[in-house]
Image: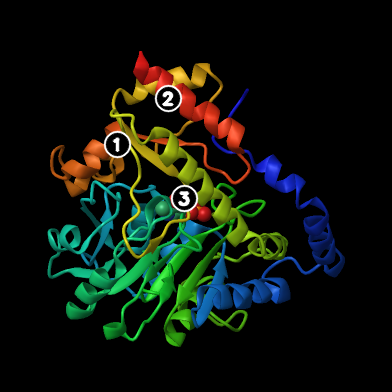
Amino acid sequence: MQVPLLDLKAQYAGLKDEIGAALERVVESQYFILGPEVEALERELSDYLGVPHTVGCASGTDAILLPLMALEPEPGDEVIVPAFTFFATAGAVWNAGFTPVFCDIDPITFNVTRETLEAVWSERTRAVIPVHLFGQMAPMKEITELATDRDAFVLEDCAQAIGARQKGDESMAREGWVMAGAWGDAGAFSFFPTKNLGGFGDGGMVTALDGDLAESVGKLRVHGGRQMYHHEMVGTNSRLDALQAAVLRVKLRHLDEWARARRANACQYHGGLADVAEVTLPEVLEGNHHVYNQFTLRVERRDELRAFLQERGIGTGVYYPVPLHLQPCFEELRGRPGALPHAEAACLDVLSLPIFPEVGEERMERVIESIREFYRG
Ligand SMILES: *Cc1c(COP(=O)(O)O)cnc(C)c1O
């Protein structure tokens, strides 16, 4: 029995007709770049997320880049990002013209907190990027409070967390649950195929609370001008394809049901692995709705366990093996080993298990049994 880390074919099999019809609609229209299909997706995502503005773009990386470009950095302006995240979070900061400043993470959630941000804050800090890693949100109330106090911009990296939400509170006039992407000044979403809402290629979306910011991002994605051949700023080509939007609109209708399946899988892992002393299961903090883009354990003898599972046909992932402050490309920022101990420790013992909606109870059980067998020795 093979248990891949992710199998997109299973999802596609159930959607073939719906997606086929949507693709055909676009092909018949011969309208491929932005246009009505992209606008419809933008509206539907605004409604789903409860945000006033959405702007489709070419990738999740660009969804981080464009709002940062809109801030028009001066050389030396800083943006704080976690050291434990996908490279794009920091790469986009760099490419926008900011200096990335790396902060540590909370070892339980893998996310930044008010304290980890404060520890590296400086006079040059203009923005912070809380990443909602693996599908659970960073603590947005305390982060937005800190940023408001210090007049910094908050960009949520929601690439792994579409549909995740967190309980607001009345003092902030935000009762009930607030979606990832609706807390900060802006949010960045990715439609890379392995994300919870994945297209048939690259794609991304920026959310914005403020109309002026959305307007700037909308210009930056088409070379800095709403009107062709008139450029108010220097942007780039970061448009979303109509074919991608058509696929994503179909899939958006299934997103919550897939999240339920991921959460049920997480439950099964918790039940099956709770008593294995060498395994630390992911914890969901109170007031959080986790959407499990990844189900990430912290384990003893990680690389051995990984090889053992591989031999049994079970796919696993290591997200991420190297913290960003120790990446060779950021050498000039002079990050040193030991500076961000929780991020560095996580790189050595994290292991992500298959959690996609179609794994099924039997294959889930196989993963659980194999891990138990490994530690029984
Ligand atoms: C995937 C991802 C991105 C980048 O998205 P792309 O669409 O691949 O450019 C950014 N941040 C995080 C945390 C991601 O997981």
Quick one: label 3, few (<14), some, or many (20+) residues within 10 Å? many
- N-terminal of the pair, mark 2 or mark 1, is 1
- N-terminal of the pair, mark 1 or mark 3, is 3
> Residue at image x 58%, y 59%?
203
Q: Nearer the viewer, mark 2 or mark 3?
A: 2
Q: Quadrant of residue 187?
A: bottom left
* Element at label 3: loop
Q: Is residue 199 left or right of residue 78?
A: right
Q: Are marks 1 and 3 in contact (CB under 8 Å)?
A: no
Quick one: label 2, few (<14), some, or many (20+) residues within 10 Å? some
Alpha carbons under labels 2 and 3: distance apart: 20 Å
Amino acid of disc 3: Tyr
Q: Is residue 142 above or below residue 101?
A: below
Q: Which residue is denoted by mark 3 in the rendering?
A: 292
* Element at label 1: helix
Quick one: label 1, few (<14), some, or many (20+) residues within 10 Å? some
> Residue at image x 18%, y 79%?
149
Alpha carbons under labels 2 and 1: distance apart: 20 Å
- The numbered dot on residue 371 is 2
Expressed as whole percent of the image width and height from the top left, the position of residue 146 reads 20, 73
Near-viewer residue (326 or 350): 350
Q: Is residue 89 left or right of residue 6?
A: left
Q: Quadrant of the C terminus?
A: top left
Amino acid of disc 1: Cys
Expressed as whole percent of the image width and height from the top left, the position of residue 14 reads 75, 49
Q: Quadrant of residue 68?
A: bottom left
Amino acid of disc 2: Ile
- N-terminal of the pair, mark 2 or mark 3, is 3
Expressed as whole percent of the image width and height from the top left, the position of residue 237 reads 56, 65
Alpha carbons under labels 1 and 3: distance apart: 19 Å
Q: Which residue is denoted by mark 1 in the rendering?
A: 347
> Residue at image x 48%, y 80%?
214
